[in-house]
Amino acid sequence: MPDARELSIRGTPIHLLREGSGPALLFLHGAGGAGRWLPFQEHLAKSFNVYFPSHPGHGGSPAAEWIEHISDLAFHYLDVLDTLELERAHLVGASFGGWIAAEIATMASHRLQSLVLIDPVGIRVDGWIYPFLFGMDMPELVSTVFHNPMAALALAPPDQSIDTLALQYRQGAALARVAWNPHLYNPLLRRRLARISTPTLLCWGAHDKIAPLVPCGQTWAREISGARLSVFDESGHVPHLEEPEAVAEAIAEFCRAAGGAA
Amino acid sequence: MKFYYFHLMPYVMEHDEPSSWVTLSNRHYDPATGHTLYNQYLDQFEHAERLGWDGLCVNEHHQNCYGTMPSPNVMAAMLVRRTTRARIAILGNGLPLRDNPLRVAEEIAMLDVASGGRVISGFVRGISAEYFSTAVNPTHSRERFYEGAALILRAWTEEGPFPFDGRYYRYPYVNPWPRPLQKPHPPVWCPSQGSSETIEWAAKRRFPYLMVFTPIKRIAQIYGEYREACERYGYKASRYQLTVNLPVVVAETDAKARELAQKHVMWVFNVGLRMHPPFWRPPGYMTEASLRRMLANPPKLPSELTFEEAERDGYLIYGSPATVRDKLRIFADELQAGILCTAMNGGTHERTLELMQLFAEEVMPHFREDAAVDETVGVGR
């Protein structure tokens, strides 16, 4: 079991899970993934010292009204690195977390030993409009996010209590604050991706219906110079939940090659 | 009691789609039918003034068959020149839905000046689904509402030009021409669904509070909260600050009225307000406190409301003129509501005109103790 801690990041309280030993790795979760220590994190913790914070407003981290833009979250995580006294770290982000990770990398590649983006959103892709997640009910969401819907069980809420429903609402609001319109992207980010100088791995589910490999994965691979694209054949939008071992192994291997071995 | 004729201007149709809002394809909208409907509905408004209604209410909704008035100010403009006496209540403009709320200040002022000061200006946030139709971020809804309202009120009452530098709206020059005719500004009404935050906001400013399509027990509760808030702000709420918007069906007999209500009022709830569940609850539209209050006592979805429940819980009034008078007494005497907003729907235009006349002749005169009172004096400003 990971250690659970409450931290204050420049006055913003957050909930943080940590486990493992080796080089530091900061994992940024996607929508609905806060605080879920699952097989993916278990595998990563064999090779890394994994830090897994919940974004403000998600999981055990209270909402932070000052967060109005995706760059606020990126600066928040630079502050997290400072607070944890991590001069450099491997940075892994999935989906919405991948968007934040990419924003961070455009600002401060020098703080990153490597960058791993798992089916990120965040850029405007020619010929693609992200399906409007906020207009979907749970069955639609599951069939849109997952290639194998059984994998969704790992994220199922524990119950339908008022507390659980209020938490889901708070998470939705925290996401909507930065991702309602433009939906799931920052119009300025794509041009800035050229600034990323960190070795970058793109992990992509072959059946992603939110940000499909073609054209989204291809666009990312083109915009980040030298990025390696790794495709997971049995996955939709969340390969780290659908093929956790394979994705964790690909990340460990990439990071070893990038020079932060364990 | 004052009577306002409230129209949704629905595009009445049956369909099997999961939602009458946002995603119901506009291929179902036949403009030729729409032409007939708009003109019939406007005729009904004009007829209402002739029959003695005190006000005519229009409202804003987007992308649905429930109400086809995406721009209430356009409809109000048509009424301004075709009526001479009735108040024209715009209930309301969805302030957060506008990127330029100064336009609302301008349009309302235009209507007020052209109508000789007959305009009532409702400020609303827009219902949940509107945030899907307009793509406005629902997490900004409340703050944009307050900021937009503050801007409009200043634009109406302060001499321009002045700069406005808000969080959502910024103008180097606020200086709208024309200025409104009514002083200090047209009455502002606040149609709402009962969130405590809005009650406070309205009570503090003496803005009348309007409950729309709400069961009677909840109306009583919200009225209580509103009156209490007014007292906290050091005054006693006038009955004209408490407005109720309620479907009323009057016909020659109880049985005839029941039949009409079952068909036409229930269409509004069961079809008109049928909504894909996510459209009811956009993230951040409600405060977490309001959400928890709602979850603790979840209201029935309108699409699942049965006629028996609607009747039992007081969502509507129907009956012969005598029955309607008795039921309306509860609103007038017990709830002390000063204004009743309602439309009539007989299924056809001609039948609707008949029911309007029946209501005007057999019900309204029994509630006219306050005929000499101007309901807008001292409220809404």
Image (tube, rainbow, N blue to C red):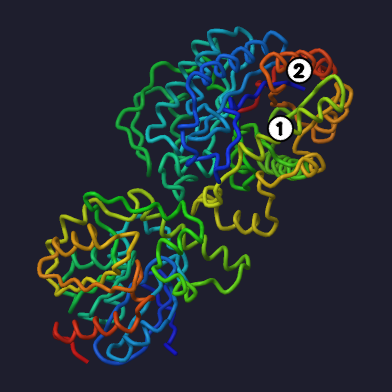
**Relative height, residue B111 to residue B148 (above, below):** above
- Of B127 and B226, which appears nearest the observer? B127
Residue A29 placed where, x, y %?
36, 71
Q: Residues within 10 Å of mark 1 (few under 14, many from 20)?
A: many
Q: Residues within 10 Å of mark 2 (few under 14, many from 20)?
A: many
Left or right of B333? Residue A141 is: left
Mark count: 2
Q: Chain of mark 1?
A: B
Q: Which mark is residue B40?
A: none
Label 1, label 2: how far apart the Cα atoms are: 14 Å
Asked which quadrant contains residue B364, the reply is top right
Looking at the image, can residue B192 be seen?
A: yes
Residue A50 placed where, x, y %?
32, 84
Task: Give the residue type at disc 2.
Answer: Leu
Q: Which mark is residue B265?
A: 1
Name the N-terminal-most of marks 1 and 2: 1
**Relative height, residue B196 to residue A30 (above, below):** above
Q: Chain of mark 2?
A: B
Q: Give me the residue at 36% from left, 82% from top.
A: A40
Q: Quadrant of the N terminus of chain B?
A: top right
**Relative height, residue B293 to residue A98 (above, below):** above
Residue B298 placed where, x, y %?
68, 55
